[in-house]
Amino acid sequence: MPELLTVHDPRGYPPKVEGKRLAQRLPSLEGKTVYLVDCLFDNSEVFMDQMRRWFAEHLPSVDTRMIKPRESWVDDPDMRAKVVADGDAAILGVGL
Amino acid sequence: MALEQAGVPSIAIHTQPFARLAASTARAAGMPRTRQVYVPQPVVDKTPDELRGYIEGLNPVSKQRFMHEVIEGLTKPLDEEDLKGVTFERSTPRLIAPNTEDNLQRLFLENNWTDNLPVILPTEERVAAMLKGTSQPPDKVVARLRPTNFREFWEITVEKVAVNAVMAGCKPEYLPVVLAHIATGYTARSSSTTSLAMLAVVNGPIRKEIGMGDGIGAMGPYNHANTTIGRAYNLASINGQGGSVPDDTYMGTLGNWFNFSTTFAEAEERSPWTPFHVQQGFKPDESTVSIFFGGRYMTSGYGPRATWKEKFIQCITAGDHNQPPLIIMDPIVARLFVDLGFDTKEKLIEWCAENAKLPAREYWDDQWVQTLTHPLAVAGVEPFASKLKADPNEPVTLYEPKDIHIVVTGGETQGAFKMIGGSYRKGATASVDAWR
């Protein structure tokens, strides 16, 4: 009979996960302001500009506004405040 | 997610390979039903027309029309699952149920708790013996680690670091050095798609006290302390941050062999220059660990020979343009540079920073310079703003003197040097003495 060993678990301690709710969705995008948030990855500006053009052609009543954070991978509270104050919805891209 | 909490319906666009990562990150953030859509990889280098094709095409994950999902994600009413979010506790037990050695080795391997090499099993007796290497209490939190900015921090205690040090094969007297690695707060196992690794340099009296190697083979697996300490840093990072698992908590596309063990000691006694830790404001009799963030590239050479200037410029400009070099040189090379008039590391570093240049168009034509540096240049931050204004053919410098560092090590069997991608960031040197 092989010897039984008691060993330590090598993992650290994860945080408790607190559930967060999603925002209520809009009835439609008609006449709404949608921020297109360019996440600053290489070429994401070109991608988001194509999103803007798509809306202009297919849903022209949507007011799309391009916006960028100050730096890549750094939270930009000023940018967020602007989106919250002036926007009805946000599309963020292109993240990895 | 912050926008959702502020009441703004949002949807995030990712590339296809990140679908699993995006889902697990959202779950760990308590918002598993976050709206996410996917486009094919890559976005980089695609033309506007090709990107328009992504937008008008299918989500490669769900196989549904991409824009239909974008609009639906912002307008489809929430259901009960969306509204409740998810709150849950995860726990990691202190001990694992008794089992045979073979079964435990298999368990550690299958749970991705190792570097895929066999480990020393951390029995209670071995961990207790390891903890005698420090006076610090077992439950003291050493650091909070995470594999990427987008994930949650996990905590790792002195005892958990000791567990991983046992697994790596460390002796108890190495433990303060392993603790200092972790105490920097820099994980050795970043999830970056660029396949990062951390290089760690040990300075001060601890090197000799525990027999670290700074002679022949200093950067290879030829010294027990160097090798096992570096391995322990990696194992404690893997387990202290909640994993380093491909397609989830690790996304480095190529991977990096430096992720096994890259801790070495500076040959302070044989170097003609000031030790690295003293350059950072520590006293010579203090012991430290310094972490260099990178490991993406390595160039090398010998000398300095008659054309050393051309060679140095070639080596520096050949690396990533946003990851400055850690220049590691044998004492023979360092002494020859002194003979050439570089009687301090700073003088040689200044020469490197002034002379390593590329045409502006080459400097800017780099994915990570575009992603990380270009926004700063646009915002007017110097010296990047001036580089952005430069004519495309105008040579621009790659780095400031503060970005480049030199460490001396090696066995003097050859006048060799290496330049390895290695950013040094503020606070990346930790005291070993604080963990004795």
Image (cartoon, rainbow, N blue to C red):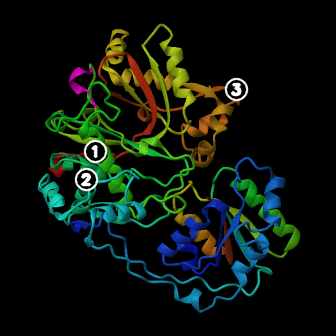
Q: Is residue B73 above or below residue B285?
A: below
Between disc 2 and disc 3, the foreground one is 2
Disc 2 on helix, strand or loop?
helix
- Mark 1 or mark 3, which has the lower sequence index? 1
Instruction: Using the numbered discs, state the Cα–Cα distance from disc 1 to disc 3 in whole angstroms.
Output: 48 Å
To the question of a shared chain for discs 1 and 3, the answer is: yes
What x and y, as percent, mark residue B28?
47, 73
> Could you tell me which chain the residue with mark 1 belongs to?
B
State the SS at label 3: loop
Direction from residue B197 to residue B79 in the image, left or right: right
Q: Amino acid at mark 3?
A: Asn
Q: Are marks 2 and 3 on the same chain?
A: yes
Which of marks 2 and 1 precedes in the sequence?
Answer: 2
Image quadrant occupied by the C terminus of chain A: bottom right
**Which of the labelled discs sits on residue B165, or is there none?**
2
* One can see residue B355 in this view: no
What distance separates the C-alpha of mark 2 from that of mark 3? 51 Å
Read off the magenta span.
B266-271
> Label 1 vs label 2: CA separation?
8 Å
Specify the subunit that label 2 lies on. Answer: B
Residue at screen point 60% across, 83% down: A23
**Residue at screen point 37% across, 16% down:** B415
In the picture as drawn, the residue positioned furthest to the bottom comes out as B80
Q: Is residue B151 left or right of residue B43?
A: left
Disc 1 is placed on an element classified as helix
Determine which residue is flagged by label 3. Answer: B393
